[in-house]
Image (cartoon, rainbow, N blue to C red):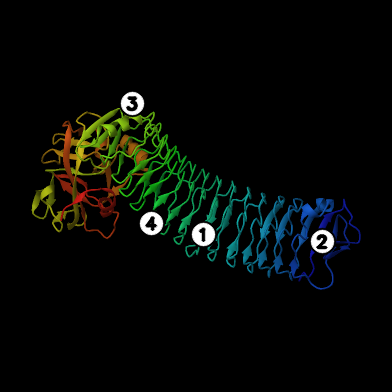
Amino acid sequence: MTIYNIAVFTNQINTGTSFNDQTGVTYTYQTGTNYNYYSTTGNPQTQIGNYAFDKSQSGNKLNYFIGFIIADTVTSIGNNAFFQCNTLSNSMIIPYGVTSIGNNAFVNCSNLINFNFPSTLISIGNNALKGCNKISILNIPDSVTNIGNYAFNYCSGLITTNIPSNVTSIQDSTFNSCTRLQSITIPLDSQINNIGVGAFYLCKALSSISIPNGVTSIGNSAFKGCYALSNIIIPSNVTNIGDGAFSTCKALTSVIIPDGVTSIGDGAFAGCVDLTGISIPSNVTNINNDAFYGCRSLTSIIIPSNVTNIGNYAFSTCIALTSISIPANVTSIGYYAYYACLALTSVTFNSTTIPLTLNNNTFQSVNASCTAYVPTGTSDSNITLIKNNGIQNVVIVDTPIPITLPCFLIGSKILTDKGYKPIQDLRKGDLVKTLKKDYLPIVLIGKSPIYNSGDLVRLKNRLYNLPKNKYHDLTEDLVLTGCHSILVDILTEEQEKATIANYSWCYVTDNKYRLETYLDPKADPYPKEGTFTIYHLALENENYYSNYGIWANGLLVESCSKRYLTELSGMEFIE
C-alpha cells in the first residue's frame, strides 16, 4: 500500500533535500539515479490540496515535473491541484478511495496519456481535465454522479468515453471541442434530464448519439458543429431546443421534433446542408430567426397550423425548397425569411390578412416564376405587400389547402365491405378493405379544397391524373394529389434517388414501397384549372403514425395515418 505521495522530477533540477508544495506539505528527497524522487513523510496524506502543484504559481521548478504517484490514503484532489502541469507524462492513476476531483485539477496537463478513475469516484469538477489533449479513452466509473462544466473541454484526442447512469446532466461545454470524439456510451437507464449549452460543440467526428428518454432540454449550441452527426432521435420528453442546438450538423439528413416542443430556437438547424426532411410538431407556435437558414437540401416542410411567427432569415437560402404554405394563424413573417430560395415556385397564404411588412424583402431572390396563392377577399393592399416583398405573380383562389397533402379527388371510389363507394359518401365506422388486415373501420375522414393550376409543371401541391390505359389495375381514371403514394413492389433507380432526396429514405407500407404520384412519369398533371375538393381517411390502427394499403378505383394506394390527418392536414372532418 502506497501511503505517501511521490513527486518525480528529471535530474536536470535539484530542489534540495526537500520542498513544500503550495499548501505547505513537505516533500523530502529520496534516492534516484535518472530521476529525482520526493515523497511526503509522517502522517499519511488524505488530500492533495488546492493549488498544490499549480504551475502558474510555483515558479520554474515545475518545468521538470514529470510524474506523480498519489498515495492510497488520499480521498480528494483539490481545485487547481495540477493546473497547467504540461510536463506530467504517461499515466495518472487515481487510487481507490478518491471521491472527488476538484475544479481545474488537471487543466492543460497536455502530456498525460491515460487517466484511471477509481470506482469510488463521485464528482469530477468544472474544467477538471480541460485541455488534456493526448487522452484517447476515458472510462468513467458508475459511481460518478456529477461531471462539471467544461470537464473535458478541449480534450481533442479523446475518441471514446461514457456517461454513467446516475449522472443527471451533461453540463455546459462538457465535451466542447473534443474534435476526435467518435462514440459516447450512455446506458438505457440513464438519469440525464438536461444537455447543457455547448455540451458537444465542435465534436466534429461524432456520428451518432443516443439521447436518453428523460432529457427535457437541449441547450444552446449543444451539438453545433458536429459535422459527422447523420442521425439524431430527439426524445419525446424534450420541450426545449435551444438556439443553434444542431447548427452546422452538415451530415444530418432528417429530424423528428417531438410533440412537446413549442418553439424552435434561433439558428437551431442553420447550416444543416444535407437536411432533406424535418417533422415539426403541431404544438410549435414560433419558428425563430435563422432556424433553418442555409438548409440547402430541404425540399419541403409543413408548417403546423398553430405557428404564429416565422422569424428573420428562418428559411433563407433553402435553395431546394419548392413550395410552402403559410398557416392562417401566422401573424408575422420576418425580413429575408425566404431570401434566395431559388427553387421556390409556390407560396400559399391561408388568410386574407397577409403577415408581411413593407420592404422586409421576405421573398427576395426567389424563383422568378414563383406564384403566391391568396384566398378570395384578399385586399389590393395585401397583394401589393406580397409584390413588395419579392413575389410578382399573385393568384386569387378559393380558400387554399396546406401543401403536400396526400388526398383523393372527390368521386374517387374506395373498396369497402359493400364494394366500391365514392369517398365523399364514406363515414366514420365504415369498413375499408386493406392489403394485410382485411377490413378495418374508418376513424377519421376529412375534406378540403385545393387549387390546381392546370398547367404541366410537376409539383407536389397539385392534382395528377392516373389514366386507366397506363395503370392496368384501374377500373377508371384516378385523380390524386402529387404526394399521394401508389404502393409498388419496386422503385426505379430515378424514383429511389428522388424519394431519398426528399425524405432521406424510402418509406414502406404493408411491405410495398410508396411511390409519390408526382414522381411517376405515367401520372399526368391534371389539366383543369380551378379549386377542387379532395378527401382522405385514416383507419383504426394502434400505431398513431402508421397507415395501410387500400384500393381506389382498383389501384393499390396508401391510406392516411391518424397523426397526419389530426395534426397536419388542416382538413374539415366529417362525422
Helix, strand or loop under label 3? loop
* Identity of the residue furthest to the left in this view: 418
Measured as percent of width and height from the top left, residue 513 is found at: 28, 45
- Mark 2 and mark 4: span between their CA atoms? 54 Å
Q: Residues within 10 Å of mark 4 (few under 14, many from 20)?
A: some
Determine the image quadrant of residue 467: top left
Residue receiving disc 4: 260
Where 178 sits versus 148, above or below? above
Kind of residue sitting beneath label 3: Ala
**In the rendered view of the protein, which quadrant contains the C terminus?**
bottom left
> Residue reaching furthest right?
16
Local crowd size for mark 2, using a 10 Å CA cut-off: few (<14), some (14–19), many (≥20): some
Q: In this figure, which residue is indicated by the disc labeled 2?
A: 21
Asked if residue 413 lies left or right of residue 115, the reply is: left
Around disc 1, counting alpha carbons within 10 Å, would you say few (fewer than 14), some (14 to 19), or many (20 or more)?
some
Of callouts 4 and 1, the N-terminal one: 1
User: Of residues 453 and 443, which is closer to you in this image?
Assistant: 453
Gap in angstroms between the C-alphas marked 4 and 1? 23 Å
Write down the residue under mark 1. 186
Q: Nearer the viewer, mark 1 or mark 3?
A: 3
Mark earlier in primary sequence (2, 4): 2
Mark 3 highlights which residue?
368
Q: Quadrant of the N terminus?
A: bottom right
